[in-house]
Amino acid sequence: MSPRLDAPRTPDAPSAAVLTDHPLGHPTELPHAFPHEGALTLPLDRPLDAIGPVDARALSKQLFARLAELEEGTHEHAYVRNTLVELNLALVRFAAARFGTRSEPMEDIVQVGTIGLIKAIDRFELARGVEFPTFAMPTIIGEIKRFFRDTSWSVHVPRRLQELRLELAKAGDALAQRLDRAPTVAELAEELGIAPEEVVEGMTASNAYTASSLDAQPDEEDGPGGEATLADRLGYEDRGIAGIEYIASLKPMIASLPARDRHILSLRFVTGLTQSEIGTELGISQMHVSRLLTRTLAKLRRGLTLEE
């Protein structure tokens, strides 16, 4: 691991070089990664995170100039790169403060922003003449926004719908102030220049941003619900629905049967008589009742199959 730039060093160490003529503080000792001819001087009489923005900007320019001269993958390159990260962490904290109202812990936001800072350091070119904070802030904020886009939604939806949700929210607020009422789907579509179907799709996608627990207690404004949770109020599959459909289909077919067959069906499946009891009731044998039932049920079964 690369040493910290603000770690104490011994003047007699062979890898140390004393640098002078420091405009911002006392001269300090740096490792051999910074040759004396570069006249690179850092105010290490205080921690890196305590250096002011003006000093940090000036020191970053010197460090970026040195970084461009070093070979990537070497100890010296990693040392300068890590120092630039520590020196500019204030940019990450400033960008993360914009998202302080989000539900995510601030430590996680700062960590994600630091990844954006590292990417900005790797891409920055001092020769372009752009100040590093100006170059780095969009990258840091973009990394944080990407983090929220990828992790904040309870159900992942396409990026197009995520962006449409934001556009609908802005357009809805603007139209509500202008019209003094909630805008309609047609008004939102006209405002954004899109089809009403896309507005409906964006509104539907907005429901995926947050999710409620099935064990959550109902709100008071939802009315008296006792201690019932959302899971207790969810519907369930009624297995009797299929039977209702079959009964509705069987009614016309049963009505078309001969009177004796209908009577036998009623005695068997409504009254609950056995085949022997039905035979005694009708004055026929139990075997004859069995054949009549088998024939009638096969006819009804074929009718249901053809209907399906």
Image (spheres, rainbow, N blue to C red):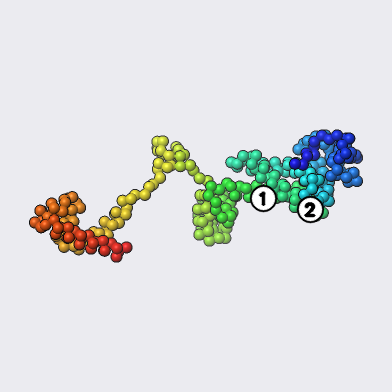
Q: Is residue 148 visible?
A: yes
Q: Please, what is the three-letter code of the amino acid marked with disc 1?
A: Gly
> Residue 85 placed where, x, y %?
75, 44
Report the residue marked by disc 1.
142
Local crowd at mark 1 within 10 Å, few (<14), some, or many (≥20)? some
Q: Is residue 50 above or below residue 306?
A: above
Task: Name the image quarter holding residue 39.
Answer: top right
Residue matched to label 2: 125
Quarter of the figure with the N terminus: top right
How packed mark 2 is, by other alpha carbons closer than 10 Å (few <14, some 14-19, many 20 or more), is some
For the residue labelled by badge 1, is the local secondary structure a helix, a strand or a loop? Answer: helix
Residue furthest bottom as drawn: 306
Against 168, residue 34 (above or below) is above
Assign a secondary structure to mark 2.
loop
Residue at position x 77%, y 46% from top? 78
Q: CA distance from mark 2 to mark 1?
A: 19 Å
Residue 307 rendering spot, x and y as whole percentages: 30, 64
- Position of residue 141 relative to residue 253, above or below, is above
Q: Nearer the viewer, residue 264 or 220?
A: 264
Q: Position of residue 284 (x, y in %)?
A: 10, 57
Image quadrant occupied by the C terminus: bottom left
- Circles 2 and 1 in contact, beta carbons < 8 Å: no
Q: Amino acid at mark 2?
A: Glu
